[in-house]
Image: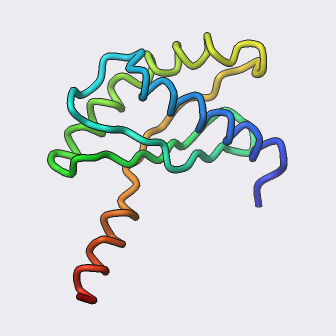
Amino acid sequence: METIRQQKIARLLQKEVGEIFNKSEVELIKGTMISVTQARVSPDLSIAKIYLSLFPADNKQEAIESIRKQASEVRYVLGKKVAKQLRHIPELHFYLDDSFDYAEKIDELLK
């Protein structure tokens, strides 16, 4: 179970990383909308798991690999943004959140 501090930091990271991707402060895949669906922080606040939803649906694995390669750049920009709120910036691990695709697949099957 997450502590209140973990939840607050996770919400902060979700908001700030989402803004980084929306404002394209880091050179990412062109023509792909990236939204942060969830963020989870480890109990020692050293690792953050960031779950991303990518649209359009083609080449998602390639896109997530590209984002993972640029994780240090995203962390650097994030560090500049949240330097006043956090002493240590957690290491960022990016994962593909395919829950929307799964829901869409179920919806199609039900039709």
Q: Is residue 41 left or right of residue 65?
A: right
- Give how far across and how far down residue 79 sits, in percent: 61, 15
Residue at 27 percent across and 30 percent down: it is: 66
What residue is drawn where x is 35% and y is 59%? 98
The furthest residue to the bottom: 110
Left/right of residue 63 with respect to residue 70 in the rendered view: left
In the image, 30 versus 45, the foreground residue is 30
Q: Is residue 57 above or below residue 110?
A: above
Q: Quadrant of residue 86?
A: top right
Q: What kind of colouring is applied to the model shown?
A: rainbow
Q: Quadrant of residue 110?
A: bottom left
Indicate whether 105 appears above or below 78: below
> Exactly how many numbered labels are in the figure?
0
Q: Position of residue 107 (x, y in %)?
A: 30, 80
Residue at horizontal 43 percent and vertical 42 percent from the top? 35
State which quadrant residue 103 falls in: bottom left
Relative side of 45 to 38, left or right:
right
Q: Nearer the viewer, residue 33 or 29?
A: 33
